[in-house]
Image: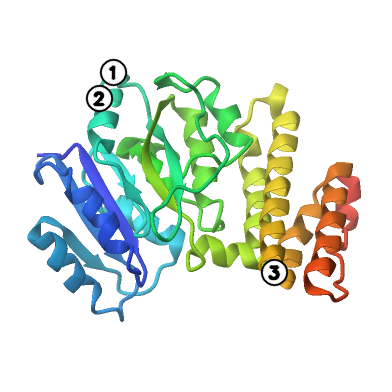
Amino acid sequence: MTPHWSVMLPVYRPDSFFEEALGSVLSQAPGPDRMQITIVNDCPTDRDVEKRVRALGGDRVEFTTNERNLGLAANWNRCIELARGKWVHLLHHDDRVYPDFYQTLERTIAQHPEAGAAFCANDCIDLQGNPLPDEDRVLQPEEGILDDAVSRLSVANRVQCPAAVVARSTYEAVGKFDRRFLFAVDWEMWVRIAHQFPVLYQPKVLASYRVHPGSETSSLTRSGETVRDCFRAIDSFSRYLPRSKRRMLRRQAIEWASDMAYCKAHQLVNTGQVDWAMALFRPALSRELRPAAWRNAALIWRHAIRVTHRFVLPPLPILPQSWFRAR
């Protein structure tokens, strides 16, 4: 019998949040005939993960280890390959879901069988699980099909993985996660799905995305790779955007990524990590025309000097000739 859900947890040296993530699933899990729960371990040398799984979930949780390290996107694709359920949920080992996550989304999906994916609102939490102040992540106030989904999902990455479930048939139709991307690998997928399928939305907060220094996202942020990856994703998914609005949507997406870079860079300066701040904001200036972006760069530079009491080189990029020709 095909289960309704496949809850897949891709892990690589999972930290102390792993038990909370898996526990949030087990606390509301129906039997294996309704929900597959599988851990896909991407670190062959880590022998302790299975012990932790068995201690918490016993035989209720399936466990598999890749023969070699695949990397983030490839391990997500491995999860999809192993999924047997009608709907697939990729849950990272440091995130969590609320007690009515699966029941609520299953009810929403049943009302709209034509949908290829379903998203819910999520909150962001810190190391202790406390909610963090964040921008409003609610895409629309009412439950149902997301209006103009491809346009709305393209201008900002406002859907986190723990808040997304996708029909296995949808993944089979649109293809795998693109291994070229790191930070924006999920964003590109959501736009690709919305281009081909109706997307459901549930405005109730049903999942938590954890923000902490040890996460993959934090590491990519400090190197500036988050911004460069966003720009690569925007270039890639632009072909899915409505032709009449493509230029406008691209500009809005680039501005969102640049604004994100400015906010993160300011936070890094506040903690004395000036070099990381400059590395983060520099790629944003290579794609921005707005005077506001250059004003933001000047503010970061001035703030860095004030915080560190030393001269810091401003994040001025070297612009290729193609930058001018493209505009």
Mark 1 lies on residue: 111
- Quadrant of the rendering where the C terminus is positioned: top right
Q: What residue lies at 37% left-to-right and 56% top-to-bottom? A: 92
Residue 276: mark: 3
Secondary structure beneath label 2? helix
Which of 292 and 152 lies nearest the eye of the viewer? 292
Secondary structure beneath label 1? helix
Which of disc 2 and disc 3 is earlier in sequence? 2
* Amino acid type at mark 2: Arg
Q: How many marks?
A: 3
* Amino acid type at mark 1: Gln
Q: Is residue 286 visible?
A: no
Tell me which corner region of the image, top left, top right, bottom left or bottom right, holds residue 107. Answer: top left
Mark 3 to mark 2 CA distance (whole Å): 44 Å
Secondary structure beneath label 3? helix
* Amino acid type at mark 3: Trp
Which of 50 and 71 lies nearest the eye of the viewer? 50
Mark nearer the viewer, 1 or 3:
3
Q: In this picture, is 129 found above or below 106?
A: below
Q: Could you classify mark 3 by the number of other residues whose Cα lies within 10 Å: few (under 14), some (14-19), or many (20 or more)?
A: some
